[in-house]
Image (spheres, grey):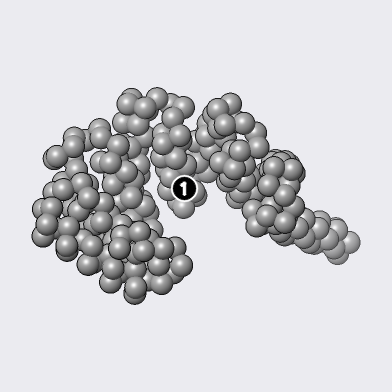
């Protein structure tokens, strides 16, 4: 039932996902108890269903319960506890509660670096999440620093053509573009697009998305150049 609920969630069938999720959670509470790991997993999944629907209050209530219970039972540094902290940080971010999101995000990074190391994939994911929090606030320098670290580490560990590496390249390209560093943004996006075409094919949705971004940026730059030329003629 839990797996079917996740399938519904992936399809955007929120009502069906929620109904199954509630059933699974309630049944596990009755049979296994409120603090059993499987019960907490079902609560976390239901919280994600609420998040995807923008039902922040309900998502937050479940997320806090899961995080606090896991801290008490498993400890603050357990991977499941850190996952629940990261999920709650995302809930705060989606509500624009930047300070709370950042505090949790930094805690997750620091603990994962301490326990798993700076190059562990889970550590890198938490760095990506914190970079997203910074981007939402327009804190480009901090977002860029994290983005560069993630991209370089993924290149070294996973290789230049790995999907996660390419995602970090496109994320960093968007950070450059948002700072009006259009040349750097275009070059990095172009590199990601070419690597994707070679690694996963020209018709893959990710490759097409990169191409569309490049086309949009080219149009923007051409329009900006035309406006500049017209302005010079007018003067």
Q: Is residue 42 left or right of residue 232?
A: left
> What residue do we see at 65% from left, 37% from top?
161
Q: To which quarter of the image does residue 204 belong?
A: bottom right
Residue 52 vertical position relative to residue 98 in the rendered view, above or below:
below
The mark total stands at: 1
Q: Nearer the viewer, residue 59 or 200?
A: 200
Instruction: Determine the secondary structure under disc 1.
Output: helix
Q: Is residue 133 left or right of residue 21?
A: right
Residue 155, percent across and down?
60, 31
Q: Position of residue 51 (x, y in %)?
A: 35, 62
- In this rendering, is residue 120 above or below 232? above
Q: Residues within 10 Å of mark 1 (few under 14, many from 20)?
A: many
Asked if residue 67 shows in the view, the reply is yes
Residue 190: x and y, percent? 73, 45
Residue 165: x %, y % from top left: 59, 38
| Residue at 43% over, 48% down | 133
Q: For this rendering, which residue is in front, 119 or 217?
A: 119
Q: Which residue is mark 1?
A: 132
């Amino acid at each position: 039932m839990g797996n079917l609920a996740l399938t519904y969630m992936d399809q955007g069938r929120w009502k069906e996902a929620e109904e199954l999720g509630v059933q699974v959670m309630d049944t596990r509470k009755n049979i296994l108890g409120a603090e059993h790991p499987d019960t907490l997993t079902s609560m976390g999944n239901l919280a994600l269903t609420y998040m995807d629907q923008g039902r922040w209050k309900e998502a937050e209530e479940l997320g806090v319960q899961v995080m606090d219970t896991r801290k008490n039972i498993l400890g603050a540094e357990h991977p499941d506890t850190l996952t629940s902290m990261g999920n709650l940080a995302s809930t705060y971010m989606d509500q624009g509660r930047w300070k709370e999101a950042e505090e949790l995000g930094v805690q997750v990074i620091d603990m994962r670096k301490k326990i798993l190391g700076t190059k562990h994939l889970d550590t890198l994911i938490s760095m990506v999440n914190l970079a997203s929090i910074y981007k939402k606030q327009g804190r480009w320098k901090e977002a860029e620093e994290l983005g560069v670290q993630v991209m370089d580490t993924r290149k070294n560990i996973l290789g230049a053509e790995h999907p996660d590496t390419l995602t970090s390249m496109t994320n960093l390209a968007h950070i450059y573009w948002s700072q009006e560093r259009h040349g750097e943004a275009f070059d990095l996006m172009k590199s990601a697009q070419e690597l994707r075409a070679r690694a996963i094919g020209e018709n893959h949705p990710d490759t097409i998305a990169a191409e569309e971004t490049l086309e949009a940026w080219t149009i923007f730059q051409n329009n900006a150049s035309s406006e500049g030329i017209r302005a010079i003629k007018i003067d």
